Image (cartoon, helix red, strand yellow):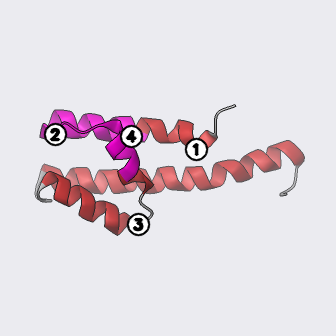
């Protein structure tokens, strides 16, 4: 059985990779984006992607903020999923 977190992270990695390729013309692999999205601080992600894009003006800034928003939402879902699975399985936390 696949881990729920790994499954829900894939769409975000794919979305981010596609945006960087299509919108900004960067040849970025999904492995690089998996690394970026594994960073635990929104500010560090913001700094890393700003460096990657060589700035944060206009569309770059919009992309960075949308990425952070999606990352935070995804992070919250990853945290809550295992708890929900425990409740559904046993009716109580382990």
Q: Are marks 3 and 4 in contact (CB under 8 Å)?
A: no
List x then y, in percent, for residue 33: 34, 45
List x then y, in percent, for residue 17: 29, 38
Q: Of callouts 1 and 2, which one flags the residue occurring earlier in the amino acid sequence?
A: 1
* Range covered by the magenta-colored residues: 12-35
Disc 3 packing (10 Å; few <14; some 14–19; many ≥20)? few
Horizontal side, residue 10 vs residue 46: left or right:
right
CA separation in Å, label 2 and label 3: 23 Å
Determine which of the numbered discs, if any, sits on residue 45 in the image: none
Q: Are marks 2 and 3 in contact (CB under 8 Å)?
A: no
CA separation in Å, label 1 and label 2: 27 Å
Q: Which residue is mark 4?
A: 13
**Residue at x 19%, y 59% (from the top left corner):** 50
Mark 2 secondary-structure assignment: loop
Q: Is residue 57 magenta?
A: no
Q: Of callouts 4 and 2, which one flags the residue occurring earlier in the amino acid sequence?
A: 4
CA separation in Å, label 4 and label 2: 15 Å
Q: Which residue is mark 1?
A: 5
CA separation in Å, label 3 and label 1: 18 Å
Disc 4 packing (10 Å; few <14; some 14–19; many ≥20)? many
* Quadrant in the picture for the C terminus: bottom right
Q: Which residue is mark 2?
A: 26
Horizontal side, residue 58 vs residue 63: left or right:
left
Q: Of callouts 1 and 4, which one flags the residue occurring earlier in the amino acid sequence?
A: 1
**Residue at x 20%, y 35% (from the top left corner):** 21
Horizontal side, residue 26 vs residue 8: left or right:
left
Q: Which residue is mark 3?
A: 41
């Amino acid at each position: 059985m696949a881990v729920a977190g790994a499954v829900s992270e894939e769409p975000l990695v794919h979305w981010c990779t596609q945006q960087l390729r299509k919108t900004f013309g960067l040849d970025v692999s999904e492995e690089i984006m998996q690394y970026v999205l594994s960073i635990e601080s929104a500010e560090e992600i913001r700094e890393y992607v700003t460096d990657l894009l060589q700035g944060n003006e206009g569309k770059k800034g919009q992309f960075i903020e949308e990425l952070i928003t999606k990352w935070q939402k995804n992070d919250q879902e990853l945290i809550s999923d295992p708890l929900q699975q425990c409740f559904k399985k046993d009716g109580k936390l382990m």
